[in-house]
Amino acid sequence: MEKTTLKGDALLYAINQAKNETKQGLCDVFTAKLERLAAHIRTNYLTPTESAELLEQEAEVIRSQHRGDV
């Protein structure tokens, strides 16, 4: 396997490209999750309190996944 070495501007460009791709991927994931939650709230006619509780539960799931609990 051939080793590629990046220097200077090429390295900075590669890093920025990777950051942008990561941001786009995270945006896609969270946007889809929010859309699913909104659909669930509408479909099941959740009250504002129930909706807030659902969002809090989802936030905890995300935190647990980040910590590696799940």
Image (spheres, rainbow, N blue to C red):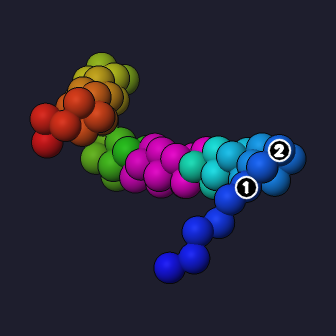
Q: Which residues are magenta?
A: 23-36
Using the image as rendered, state which of residue 41 and residue 58 is in the foreground. 58
> Helix, strand, or loop for circle 1?
loop
- Residue at (23, 30) in percent of width and height: 67
Residue 44, horizontal then vertical, whole percent: 28, 47
Q: Could you say which disc has been placed on residue 8 in the image?
A: 2
Residue 53, horizontal then vertical, whole percent: 26, 24
Residue 65's place in the image compared with 52, above or below, is below
- Residue at (81, 53) in percent of width and height: 10
Q: Could you say which disc has been placed on residue 6 in the image?
A: 1
Q: Residue furthest left?
A: 69
- Residue at (24, 38) in percent of width and height: 65
Residue 7's place in the image compared with 2, above or below, is above
Q: Is residue 56 visible?
A: yes
Could you tell me the amino acid type at mark 1? Leu
Q: Residue furthest bottom?
A: 1
Mark-to-mark CA distance, 2 and 1: 7 Å
Could you tell me the amino acid type at mark 2? Gly
Is the residue under label 1 in contact with that under label 2 (CB below 8 Å)? Answer: no
Is 1 positioned to the left or the right of 69 in the image? right
Residue 15's place in the image compared with 52, above or below, is below
Query: Residue 54, located in which quarter of the rendered image?
Result: top left
Residue 28, horizontal then vertical, whole percent: 55, 54
Query: Residue 52, located in which quarter of the rendered image?
Result: top left
Q: Residues within 10 Å of mark 1 (few under 14, many from 20)?
A: few
> Helix, strand, or loop for circle 2?
helix
Dominant secondary structure of the residues highlighted in magenta in the image: helix
Q: Is residue 2 magenta?
A: no
- Residue at (52, 47) in percent of width and height: 26
Q: Is residue 58 visible?
A: no
